[in-house]
Amino acid sequence: MEGQIYGILYFWVMLFENCNNCGQTVAQNDKFCKKCGVSLSEQFVVCTNCHRRNTMTASFCGVCGNALKTSEDYEKKYLGLWMNALRNRIMQDHQAQNLEDYLENFYANGFHKTFLNSAKQLGKEVAELEAINDRQSAKKIQTLEYHRIENLLDYFIIHHCKDFNTIHFSEKILKYQNIQLEELELVKMILDYLNLEQEEFTFYTDFLLMPVDSLKNASKYFLFPEKDEKIWLICDLSGMDNFKEGFAFTEKALYWKAPFEKAQRVHFFNLDKIMIEENWLLINNSFFNANTTLNLKLLYLLRKLKRLFVK
């Protein structure tokens, strides 16, 4: 009889606990208290071994004894990832000699506190996914961490580091940070990132205004869209406005032709390796070059498109 009672009590403890806010009994898989509505993820730490929820002050799981990750553990992890990503970004994209200025600015302007708050929230989201402990959740964690760090990098560099950057980025592109693909007007985002009005290149978005010979040359030398594929932008890079060299954006892909190179195309969902090499841009190991400012703006745009399309 005592064994049966103990078993029932153990079963109850394993499946139920009390909300710290109102005392309501809640189940292990509840995300919110059904009485007061408070988020339970902020009241408990989930064990990554047995998936049992524990109090926020617990160092070890009360069921299996596994050491529990704390918010400080996640903050330390993401601070390390952030610093590595920031160093890589500055060394590759900007002026390496200014790296120390970027690092000092991270702490000096208050962004360090913003980052730690974001890291704490990210840690909560990751802890919930870690508790599920399957292959799909592991992939979600990897994607979530990558996107969050990259978005924070963009915000920090564009908003807080204007004095150190190689070029001036328009802050209006930051409005696209937390918008999902299905919610945004993609063509407007592309044009905002490139900000071609500030460049010296000839470009068209209204092809009724584009000279017929220029349109024919673009279609002959590098722009080969699929049937019914909408063309959004065509830009000349020949230096003579003949559009025998240039790039174009459609609703699906980037098309371009560089001097002495064959025409290239990369679909947004196939974006992979994008980086500055010397003074030009490598897109999936293919050469692209316009000028310093447009190369860098295109780099940031393609990284954003990769985050949106490549899962």
Image: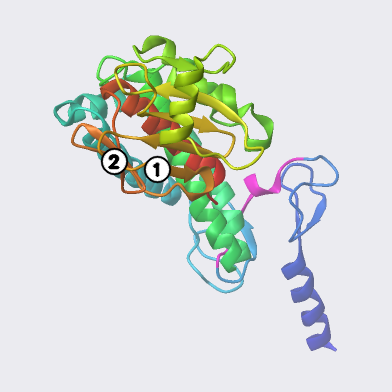
Residue found at the very far left of the displayed protein: 97
Determine whether label 2 and label 1 are within 8 Å by CB: yes
**Image quadrant for the N terminus?**
bottom right
Q: Residue at x 70, y 48 (%)?
A: 40
Magenta region includes residue 288: no
Can the viewer see residue 114 in this picture? no
Magenta region includes residue 45: yes
Indicate the amino acid at tag 1: Gln
> How many other residues sit within 10 Å of disc 2, few (<14), some (14-19) or many (≥20)?
few
* Residue 70 x, y percent position in the rendering: 48, 52
* Residue 41 x, y percent position in the rendering: 65, 48
Picture quarter containing residue 63?
bottom right
Q: Residue at x 79, y 55 (%)?
A: 26
Q: Which residue is mark 2?
A: 261
Can the viewer see residue 150 in this picture? yes
Q: Which mark is residue 50?
A: none
> What count of labels does the image hold?
2
For residue 119, side relative to residue 5 (left or right)? left
> How many other residues sit within 10 Å of disc 1, few (<14), some (14-19) or many (≥20)?
some
Q: Which residue is mark 1?
A: 264
Q: SS of the residue at dot 1?
A: strand
Q: Residue at x 53, y 29 (%)?
A: 177
